Image (cartoon, rainbow, N blue to C red):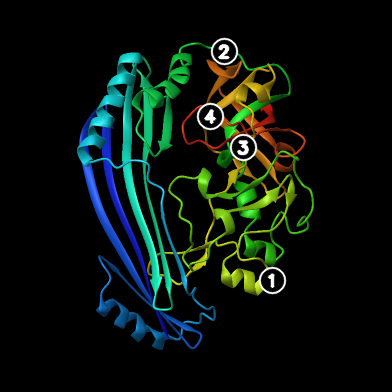
């Protein structure tokens, strides 16, 4: 019998922003604890809000009677502690940061009204058992999510800007918003051509890839990539995987305690689809590699979860990748979908013209479309090393424009 504790701690300072000012502050401290007991191919689980206790472990042990099958050995004799924090701020300093950021933005752009949220989040995850496993991961980061509305606009809101990182830098964060906010009042025309270069968040157009890499779907032959494993399907310049160094808020172990060498793994490498993502059960069922993708709640049996996939960055900037071409930067896009054949289409509610690597004007609404094998294949331009917003994961690709 092996007894294991999974603990999640989260401290969050949330600033509610209304009309360009912090109007309320909410502070949360939450601890969630799960106990697991493994014995004879079964698992017993119990959870609580708060710190773990002997009673919690006893409850998990009693739940072995439910005969929940779990034939996989828990991790043993592994110790690692990771602390990704770059700064430690008091709650008061977080509020001061938010107030200063809003003051700078309002001074620079008085024609806009700002609202929504600014958060500072501290996390600590630990997974420990009496077989020698002792994992702990600590992180702290800000999330700025600001909605803007022009004072002359009749809309509820006109757009949004965001940033995510581990250290406060008011001037740097505010500066990344400047081009977009300045360009809002400068009408521009879409670049000529049936297809135009588009700078867009990977998640906005790559959701079907994440779905298709699901190990269960691949194993059952229901994935778009079912007949493409090990084959070249995308551009040489497109590599996609998990990379802890490139991510904020992720941890180095999954809910089963599985880890990856070097904290990274490429599911697509130089255009070749290598494998899907899997937890222990998926890997065992379908003969796949366990890619440390177990998810589930603190009081759940571990199950397959979706990894945070990030495209590998090139060594070129947006300007260098575009080679003087005009491009489109997608600021807000919703209502789109991708078919089971990989055909993507979506209306774009807010977009900007990009010239010489900078946002210069606001574009009218339009539609984008393309097949994902083209978007990330022959029409793929690259992954810039810079971004229009801190913490973003953008790609550049040529896509069809419906004017």
**Where residue 242 sits: x, y (%)?**
57, 51
The Cα atoms of the two marked residues, 4 and 1, are separated by 39 Å
For mark 2, what is the residue? 188
Dot in front, 2 or 4: 4
First of labels 4, 3 by sequence position:
3
Horizontal placement of 230 versus 95: left or right? right
Dot in front, 2 or 1: 1
Q: Nearer the viewer, residue 98 or 113?
A: 98
First of labels 2, 4 by sequence position:
2
State the SS at label 3: loop
Q: Nearer the viewer, residue 207 or 13?
A: 13
For mark 1, what is the residue? 287
Dot in front, 3 or 1: 3
Dot in front, 2 or 3: 3
The label number, if any, that marks residue 316 in the structure image: none
Q: Which quarter of the rendering shows the N terminus? A: bottom left
The Cα atoms of the two marked residues, 2 and 4, are separated by 21 Å
Dot in front, 4 or 3: 3
**Where residue 269 sits: x, y (%)?**
71, 48
Horizontal placement of 374 versus 173: left or right? right
């Amino acid at each position: 019998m092996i007894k294991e504790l999974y603990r999640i701690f989260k401290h969050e300072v949330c600033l509610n922003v209304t009309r360009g000012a912090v109007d309320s502050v909410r502070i949360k401290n939450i601890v969630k604890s799960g106990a697991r007991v493994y014995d004879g191919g079964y698992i017993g689980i119990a959870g609580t809000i708060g710190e773990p206790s002997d009673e919690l472990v006893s409850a998990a042990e009693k739940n072995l009677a439910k005969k929940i099958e779990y034939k996989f050995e828990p991790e043993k004799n592994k110790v690692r502690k990771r602390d990704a924090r770059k700064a430690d701020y008091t709650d008061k300093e977080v509020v001061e940061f938010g107030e200063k950021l809003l003051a700078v933005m309002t001074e620079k752009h008085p024609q806009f009204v700002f609202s929504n949220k600014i958060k500072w989040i501290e996390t600590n995850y630990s997974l420990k058992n009496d077989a020698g496993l002792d994992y702990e991961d600590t992180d702290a980061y800000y999330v700025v999510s600001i909605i803007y509305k022009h004072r002359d606009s009749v809309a509820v809101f006109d757009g949004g800007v965001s940033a995510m990182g581990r250290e406060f830098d008011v001037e740097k964060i505010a500066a990344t918003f400047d081009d977009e906010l300045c360009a809002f009042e400068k009408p521009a025309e879409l670049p000529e051509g049936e297809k135009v270069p588009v700078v867009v968040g990977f998640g906005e157009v790559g959701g079907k890839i994440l779905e298709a890499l699901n190990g269960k779907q691949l194993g059952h032959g229901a994935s778009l990539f079912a007949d493409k494993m090990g084959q070249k399907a995308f551009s040489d310049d497109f590599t996609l995987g998990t990379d802890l160094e490139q991510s904020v808020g992720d941890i180095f172990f999954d809910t089963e305690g599985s880890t990856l060498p070097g904290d990274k793994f490429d599911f697509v490498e130089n255009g070749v689809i290598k494998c899907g993502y899997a937890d222990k059960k998926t890997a065992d069922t379908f003969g796949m590699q366990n890619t440390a993708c177990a998810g589930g709640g603190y009081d759940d049996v571990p199950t397959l979860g979706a990894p945070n996939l990030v495209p590998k960055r090139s060594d070129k900037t947006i300007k260098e990748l575009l080679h003087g071409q005009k491009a489109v930067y997608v600021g807000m896009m919703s209502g789109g979908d991708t078919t089971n054949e990989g055909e993507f289409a979506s209306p774009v509610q807010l977009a900007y013209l990009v010239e010489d690597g900078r946002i210069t004007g606001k574009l009218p609404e339009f539609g984008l479309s393309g097949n994902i094998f083209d978007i990330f294949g022959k029409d793929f331009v690259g992954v810039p090393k810079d971004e229009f917003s801190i913490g973003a994961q953008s790609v550049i690709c040529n896509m069809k424009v419906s004017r």
